Structures are given as C-alpha cells and as structure tokens.
Amino acid sequence: MRLDGMTAVITGGTRGLGRAIAESFLREGASVLCAARNPYDIKELADDHPGRLGYQRTDVSDEESVRALVEAAVSRFGRLDILVNNAGVSRDGKIARLSLQDWESTVTTNLTGVFLCTRAAITPMEAQGGGRIINMSSCVSTRTAVGAAAYSASKAAVDMFTRTAALELAPKRITVNALAPGYIDEGMGAQLAANPRAWETYRSRLLAGRLGQPEEVGAAAVFLACADSAYVNGHVLEVNGGLNWAA
Ligand SMILES: NC(=O)c1ccc[n+]([C@@H]2O[C@H](COP(=O)([O-])OP(=O)(O)OC[C@H]3O[C@@H](n4cnc5c(N)ncnc54)[C@H](OP(=O)(O)O)[C@@H]3O)[C@@H](O)[C@H]2O)c1
C-alpha cells in the first residue's frame, strides 16, 4: 500500500471528489481526516477502515477553524503528511450580473482557503521533516468559459499559488502540486453533465469521449501523495480525458 502509515487532511472530503480521494487514500493505507462545514455520516466508511477515518467540522475560509483542523489532525494521528486542499465552490454568472457576494464566496473558499490551510500545515510538516500538499485546480484555470469568471480566476490563482508555494517550501522538504480535473461524473461535473445542452458542448471536446470517474482523480491524488512523485514539484497535473478546448 503506497500510503501506509501516512496521515492526510482532505478539505471538502465529505462528498464529491474529496470523498473519492479520501476513499483512495484509505485503500492505500493512509489515515484520513475529512473537513467540511456540514457534518456527514462517516460510519460506513469508518467501519471499513477502523480507526483511520475522522471528520472535523471546518470552514476553510476561517483562520481559527483551519488552525483547529490542523491541530485536530496532529492530536488525533500524531503527524500530518498530506494536505489536500480540495474544498471549493462554483458560482457561475456573467460578470455584468455577478454579485459581489458570489464573487467573494468563490475567491474566499477556493483561493483564501488554500492559502490558510497551506500556511497552517507548514509547521507540523516541517517539524516532521517534510510533507505533501495537493491543491485542487480545474481545467478552466487555463481556459475561458462564459459565466466562469469568478471560478476560473480563483483556480488560475490556485495554479500560481501552487508554484510559489513549491518554491518557498522546497527547503522544508514539502512538495506542492495541483490537480486540474476536467469533467468528472461527481459533484460539480455531474451537475454540468446533467444539463443536456451543456454536456453536448463539452462532450465533443473530450478525447476520451466520456466523463471522468471520481476514482481516476483519486488515483492521480494518490500518485501526488506517495513516494512515486518525489521528483514532481510545482506541477499542475491535468486529469481531463484529453480535453481539447479548440474543438
Ligand atoms: N467535479 C468536477 O468535475 C470538478 C472539476 C474540476 C475541479 N473540481 C474541483 O474539485 C473540488 C471538489 O469539487 P466537487 O465537484 O467534488 O464539489 P462538491 O461535490 O460540491 O463538494 C465540495 C466539498 O467542499 C466542501 N466545502 C465547500 N466550501 C467549504 C468551506 N468553506 N469550508 C470547508 N469545506 C467546504 C463541501 O462541504 P460543505 O458544503 O459541507 O462545506 C464539500 O465537501 C473543488 O475544488 C472543485 O473546484 C471539480
């Protein structure tokens, strides 16, 4: 098992891609603390992996809440090896009609949340000799889409934050990479695919001709978390079935 004995915090680990990553990590032997604002029932998954799954109520945009999350991970598992900054929201809307509230909640969750969680994880990771940070970007961090200004701008910023964090944290033996999923059959991607007009537009752009599966994002996250990717740093890994925006 590639993550045997390691411990991970996964923000937004209660549903969607975060939950899929949590399941992949658990299968690979890691202990996982999932964080989100709303409680969820971890019993079934926890029963399958006794003593290795926890939940901490957290708002990633709140400094104190993030501090408590990292403290909870260290006190529960004794260390923090992997942080997955996955929590995110999408508030679509053309700029002319986009409310300040929607703009701010997108940027605060998707970007400020990544900053706060990364900053909080540095001390325990450095103290134990290193760690892995994986940020959740998106295919629209580098591609334009009408109505996605807030979301795509926040994800483009996550890409640059990832590269800068990799630069700053390399001396502490912490690697920082990002995953940029395309359209995944879970969470936000499944919502988009449920709209037949939107799905027709996007399907023609997918070399794979299908939505991605959440396990495929989980597998990429395991790669970035385990020893196989020791020489990968500051990279944004696209997991998008060969998304060709020009098609
Ligand atoms: N699904 C896709 O196709 C796709 C494609 C590209 C990128 N992504 C990215 O992948 C990540 C997960 O997306 P998803 O589709 O799985 O979304 P999702 O199903 O909506 O799940 C989002 C998760 O984030 C949590 N969350 C939201 N705001 C939070 C906050 N302020 N503090 C703590 N947790 C918060 C949610 O829990 P609570 O609401 O309970 O807090 C939930 O667990 C996002 O960063 C998204 O941008 C997804």
Image (spheres, grey):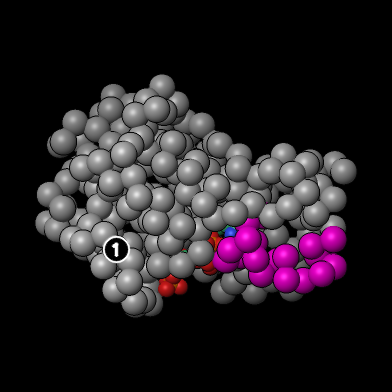
* CB of mark 1 near ligand 1 (< 8 Å): no
Q: Residue 43 appears in which quarter of the rendering? A: bottom left
Give the farthest residue toward the right: 247
Give how far across and how far down residue 95 sits, in percent. 73, 65
Q: Which residues are magenta?
A: 183-200
- Magenta stretch, main secondary structure, is helix
Identified at 78% across, 49% down, the residue is 209
Give how far across and how far down residue 139 sits, in percent. 65, 47
Q: Is residue 86 left or right of residue 74?
A: right
Between residue 153 and residue 214, name the one nearer to us.
Answer: 214
Give how far across and how far down residue 67 sits, in percent. 23, 59
Amino acid carrying label 1: it is Asp
Between residue 190 and residue 63, name the one nearer to us.
Answer: 190
Report whether residue 59 is seen: no
Q: Is residue 166 left or right of residue 47?
A: right
Identified at 51% across, 64% down, the residue is 16
Helix, strand or loop for disc 1? helix
